[in-house]
Amino acid sequence: MGNYNRFWRWHFYAALFITPLLITLTLSGIGYLFYTDVENRAYADLFFGKSSKTETLTVDEGIKQARDQFDGFAVSKVIMLDEPYNTRLTMKNAAGEQKYVFLDEQNQTIGSQDARYTFSNVMRETHSSLFVGGTVVNYLVELAATWAIFLLVSGLYLTFKGRVWKQSPKLSPRQSKKKRHAIVGTIITIPMIIIIFTGLPWSAFMGDFIYTASQKYPSLGQPQVEALTSDMSEVPWATRKNEAPASTDAHAHHGGMNAATELTNESNRLPIEQLMQKIEEARISKPYSIVYPGSDDGVYTVSKSSNTGVTGLDVSPYEEMTAYFDQYSGRLIAQTGYEDYGILAKWFTWGIPLHEGHLFGWANKLLNTVVCLAFLLVIFWGIKTWLSRKAEKQEFAPPKVSSPISFGFLSFVVVLGVIMPLFGISLLVVALIEGILHITRGKRGRTA
């Protein structure tokens, strides 16, 4: 019984500490599953509305009009969507604040949104960083996700080791709740682990580790291009932090200018209208996003992604593509598509939209919702079981284990620690605390 009680004790304490986080992550995750449906209705006037003005402007004139209207804000992205969606501009000011501005089919301004408080961004920020942000919070969220894996797997062990399904039909209320907790938890273990693992590419610690590995080994990720990093959310996960090529046509098209101050003049940059012609010549169809160059030798980054977080912009994983155009001539410099990805990049290109609930339409949303609701039920029954245990005046926690840690238990936690490094680090911290407490108790005992 040593291993059983040890798993039970760890399962209990892990659940006790991370349950509030798991409930928050699950509820915000359910909300995010339906963000496109919510936004299509809540923001219909911006997404599909028309201006009362009948004059037709070019895209560049529409962009200028928006820039004049929102003083202090500059356009950083242009998102071209399929009909009936309006064109969406992302505008940013010196303080880092963002607005989404919408242009109708005449490129007239319809209205704007504060980017921070759109439904999709609120759900995503709550889900990934509790709407607080910061490295510590991101690590805390990731830690909860990795410990949830431990809860699910250890729960599986406890269910089969304890032969829960063979218990007598005449059960006490506490035993009945425990049985439901165990059986439903067992049923959702595999789908829940898949949902958690397909969300880890966005995590702070493990996500960076996965991405670094995919870039270091092209057969896992995809080939690098050249200089300038990007962290734009509309760019595919597989190329989001890629180094992009530089615009090399500045001197040829602008009289050999050398001063960087001269090259920052937007009049030297290819207008969006002409860039769109170059994009069409490259056989890139809507929807796509255009990210402005970040420097004088930067490039226009044009992308199609399966995990943008923008209503109307997601495409099939097969259609993912990132292309780089010279900002002065519009020359296509480099292009990376799904077919260029390695095994890991391809796996996550499918996994992320599966996690977000739009890989295979409504069936995906409903499946994820059912699994998440079942997970909340498992948490609910777990809490009820514990409260029943207290009501019956049993011990607050499962009994302490005096037997040495078995090789099987140690192997299990080591394997999980290697697969999920942040989980492994947290285990070392727990072991250190336990060691300090053990030494302290020993000293107290000798003193007494």
Image (cartoon, helix red, strand yellow):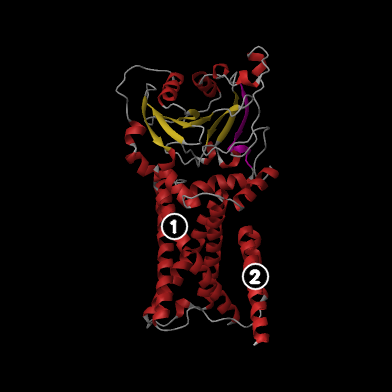
Q: Which residues are magenta?
A: 331-341
* In this view, 436 is above or below 237: below
Residue placed most toward the observer, 204 or 363: 204
The answer to whether residue 142 is left or right of residue 122 is right
Q: Which residue is mark 1?
A: 24
Write down the quadrant of residue 236 in the picture.
top right
N-term mark: 1 or 2: 1
The answer to whether residue 327 is left or right of residue 30 is right
Q: Secondary structure at mark 1?
A: helix
Amino acid at circle 2: Ala
The numbered disc on residue 251 is: none
* In this view, 91 is above or below 168: above
User: Crowdedness of circle 2 by 10 Å Cα count: few (<14), some, many (20+)?
Assistant: few
Please report the residue visible at 43 percent of the width from the left and 71 percent of the height from the top. 382
Amino acid at circle 1: Thr
Q: Quadrant of the N terminus?
A: bottom right
The numbered disc on residue 431 is: 2
User: Crowdedness of circle 1 by 10 Å Cα count: few (<14), some, many (20+)?
Assistant: some
* In this view, 118 is above or below 422: above
Query: Is residue 382 on the magenta stretch?
Result: no
Q: Quadrant of the C terminus?
A: bottom right
Q: CA distance from mark 1 to mark 2?
A: 28 Å
Please report the residue visible at 45 percent of the width from the left and 83 percent of the height from the top. 394
Q: Secondary structure at mark 2?
A: helix
Q: Is residue 211 visible?
A: yes
Q: How many marks?
A: 2
> Which percent across, then down, holds residue 108?
37, 23
> Which percent across, then down, holds residue 309?
47, 41
Q: Is residue 217 visible?
A: no
> Which percent across, then down, holds residue 192?
49, 59
